[in-house]
Structure formats: structure tokens, C-alpha cells
Image (cartoon, rainbow, N blue to C red):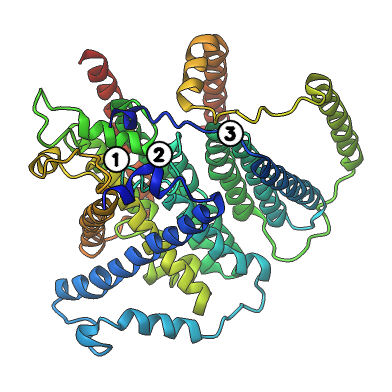
Amino acid sequence: MTELFATDYFWETWPWWADTIFRLIFAIVAVLLPAGATVYLYLFKMVSFMQSRLGPMEAGPYGSMQLVAELGKNLQKEDIFPARADRTVFALAPYVVLASTFLLAVVVPFGPEATFVNLDTGVYFALAVSSVSVVGILMAGWASASKYSLLGGLRAAGQLIAYELPLILAVVGVVIQAGTLNLQNIVTAQNQQEIFGWGAIGNPYIITQLLGFIIFLIAVQAELTQVPFDMPIAESELVSGYMTEYSGFRFLMFFIGEFATANIFAFLGATLFLGGWAVPPFVTDLFNIAWDSPIMNLVGPFVMLTKMLLLTFIFYWVRFTFPRFREDQLQKFAWKVLIPLSLINIALTAVFKVAF
Amino acid sequence: MMSLLLFAQEIEPLTNTEQWVINTFFYVIALVTVVAALKMVTTNNVVHAALYLLIVLAAVAAVYIILGAEFAAATQVLVYIGAILVLLLFGVMLTRAKIGSEDDLNYDQRWIGGLVSVVLFAVMGYSLWEGFEDTKLDPAFQPQRTGDVAESIFTQYIVPFEAVSVLLLAALIGAVVVARRD
């Protein structure tokens, strides 16, 4: 079993094209499977319980086939183009958003060797490609030839630009502490550093970078345009913002993009702040294996899934309990609270990094 | 185990097939870049022009990746696509963004612009040709490490780096002063 997953056996004897196809399929699985899981678990069920109702119960036992029903419903709907829309841009916009989601997924490590790409720029690349989705949103808003859509698109762009800064600055603290941009090395650093000589749980950066973690969560919530930052798709004012005119398959792509991006940001948060795919070193000591033994290639994805579900739970918990920010409050909160706080966090981290 | 910490990825020299694949990809990307650039200046719609610019910028980032300059590629995406292009689209959509073609997009200065770009192309092409001529990319080349980039910026090029920082800060403050007329 162990030999099968040893590096030189499992990965490196493959021709490059087989490797590419294998990674491609797994990337699609890694994006779509968690998206489906969180939509069913949280959007359908958890929210229903929070609002004292049952949620979908008819399709399959306990409504578990509801997702398939939704998929079928959306796929057979007519793909409507508004009469005055810019057809090409309108049709391409969902692909741009989804492309950004998939590019974001490729850098997340799921085990010591289970990575799609082990980029040296890791987290920097992730933050860079996450900003591409804004272009897709603006394309959708403009090409729909609808005032609601355009307003939604503009609001989304303004918000995403404003909250990208605290997102990046919150991550800088982690990068300083780990001394690397590579996500795999950030995981390594978290599991090999010690807290004042006590290494039983490694040093997950949620402890030292708590401020950064909180800013990260808030900024991600805003990047996903979820409540309390959902001005771009405020349904009581803008119908559904930039998605208003979309239907059928293209709406489904926006929908998948939205939830898959939430998951991947949760994956990133887990990698940066919760120790990534590794379990705390004292657990691996119990089983007498190294913290990065090849078996973690199998266990790692499940550890990541658990941590991801934990973080997405927080996203949806906030999403369904908070009221909405007003547009000016939203901008003020980013520029006058989050950015100064994250700058202070960076300064403090740098001081401690030099001092210790 | 400790090898993970450093991630010394030993990358073997490229085989002939791999070089062939990389070259093919380069020519495809180059073709896309040139066509998108031409469409960008000839299209009759401002938003379409901005979106063609997006293709050009993304293709340039792809060329950086082929050359193993990951950091430059990510910066290209973050700065040019994520910030500048989004601001451009944002501004265009806030002010004038009709759907369909516009007739008044062509200006009298386009011939001068064409002349400038031809001269620029000649000068840059000549200098690149003189500088590298038929030098081939070393098949054993390694992707550039971000740590090396940081080291060269903060040791060898520290003075230009700081000068550019001050210049950008001055531009930032200048923009605020010009925009705020209280």
C-alpha cells in the first residue's frame, strides 16, 4: 500500500499527458463535489433548520436527490438572451467567472504529493486569479442590457476591488510568518514550527494570526458577495444583480461558480490558517508515522474536506443571520477598518518575526 | 521529510517532445495575442476593445509562464487584469458603454498612433534581435524562484526599487490632490 503511493512510483512514471488528464479530472471533481455537498448540506438543509422548516424533502430520501433535480431543471430550461443584449459577451461571461474558480482550485495542496500544481508563487497566484472573476461579473452586468444588471455589475466591481486589498494584506501576515509563498511550504511550516517548544499541534497560524484570519474571513465573505456584503445582488433592489437576465445553463454556471469559489476560498483558508491537509503532529505520533508520510495523500483530502466544511459553515452561518450593509457603510468598512487593521497586523507580525 | 521544507524540485532538462510542445504553445499564444491586439484597435465598441485588451494581457501572462517566470505572470494577472483592466471597464461602463457599434470612436490621430507603433515595433524588434539573435533557450532552464526575485529586488536593485516606490507614492498623492477639490 505504502509503495503504491511512494513518489517515484505513483506519479513520476506517468507520461506527462496522462498526468495532465488525471489532474484535470481530479480538479473538476475537487471543484464540483464540494460545491454540491455544501449546497445540499448548508443551503438546502442547514438554513431550513435555522428558519424552522424542513427544506427539500420530496426528491429522494430526505430530499437528498434535490441537487440532481435542480440540475435537471436548470439544464432543460431555455437559454434566453435578452433582445438588446450583446450576445457574445453575454454568452462568455459565465465562462470567465468559472475559469477563475478553476484556476483558483489548482494551487490548493491536498497531501504531501497530492497537488495539482505545486507553484512557487502559490498563494500569490491564487489571489491574482481570484480577481479575474470581477471581469466576468462586469461583462455579465454590461452585456445584459438591463439597468438592474449594470448596477449590480458596477456595485460588484467596486466591492470586489475594495475587499481584495484586505484579503491580500491579511494573507501577507501568514506569508511573513511562514517565510514563503508556496502553499505546500506554508503547510510544512505550520506543522514543523512549535509554540514555545511545544509541538504537539504544530503551530497553526489561526493562533498567531487570529486577526489576519478574521480579516480573511470577512474579506472572503465580501469577495463572494454574500450577506452581509450582498449589495451587488440585493434582491429587494436589483432583482438578482448581474445574474438577473441569465437563465438555464448559464445561470447554473454562475451558481456553481459562486458556491465552488466559496469552497475553494475555504480550502485556501484551511491551508493558510488551519494547518492544511496535515493532522496535528500528536495524532500522527500515535500511529507512529511521520506527519507527511505518503498515506497522507489519501487522508489529506478528507482532512481538507473537514476543515473546508467547518469554514464554509461559518460563511453560511453569517450569510443567513446578518442584515445587509449599506453601500457607503460597506466601502467605509473596507477602507477605514479592515485595511488599517491588516496593515497593523503586518507590522506586528514583521516585528515579532524579527524579534523571535 | 525535510526535503519537503525546501521543495527543491529537481526538474530534468526538457526532452525534444516537450520543447516541441512548448514551441507550439508559444506560437498559438503569439497568434492569439497579435490578432486580439489588432481587433482591439479596430473594433467599434469601447467595451469590446477593453475585452480584447484582456485577451492580450492574459496571453502575455501565458508567455511569462512558458518562460518559467511565475512571479511575473501572477503579477501581470493581478495588476493588469485584476486592477487596471477592471478599473478601465468600470470607468467605461459608468460613463459611456453603448451596446452595438459606435461611429465616433475613430480619431484623426490614428495615423500618428500607427506611425508611433510601427517605429516602436522596429526599435524594440531590432534591439531584441541584436541582443539575442539566434540564442536558444537552455533546455535545462529552471522556473524562476520567487525567493530569487525578492533577493535581487532587495539587494541588487534596491535603489531603483525605492525610487519607483517614491514615484508611485507621489503619483498616488497627486491623483488624490487632483481629484479632491474641496
| Gap between marks 2 and 1 measured at Cα | 9 Å
Going from N to C along the chain, the mark reached first, 2 or 1, is 2
Nearest the viewer among A89 and A228 is: A89
Residue placed under numbered mark 1 in the picture? A272
Q: Nearer the viewer, mark 3 or mark 1?
A: 3
| Gap between marks 3 and 2 measured at Cα | 17 Å
Residue placed under numbered mark 2 in the picture? A123
Residue A243 visible in the shown view: yes
Reply above or below: A212 against A42: above
Task: Give me the chain letter of mark 1.
Answer: A
Q: Residue at x 42, y 38 (%)?
A: A122
Q: Position of residue A33 (x, y in %)?
A: 35, 66
Asked which secondary structure carries label 1, the reply is helix
Of the 4 image quadrants, the one containing the C terminus of chain A is top left
Q: Are marks 2 and 1 on the same chain?
A: yes
Q: Is residue B58 left or right of residue A234?
A: right
Residue type at mark 2 is: Val
Q: Residue at x 67, y 71 (%)?
A: A87
Reply above or below: B127 against B115: above
Q: Is residue B162 left or right of residue A294?
A: right
Residue placed under numbered mark 3 in the picture? B68
Reply above or below: A8 against A96: above
Q: Nearer the viewer, mark 3 or mark 2?
A: 3
Residue type at mark 1 is: Leu
Q: Position of residue A17 (x, y in %)?
A: 56, 54
Residue A110 visible in the shown view: no
Q: Position of residue A199 (x, y in %)?
A: 12, 30
Q: Are marks 3 and 1 on the same chain?
A: no
Q: Are marks 3 and 2 on the same chain?
A: no
Task: Give me the chain letter of mark 3.
Answer: B
**Label 2 packing within 10 angstroms: few (<14), some (14-19), many (20+):** many
Q: Quadrant location of residue A85?
A: bottom right
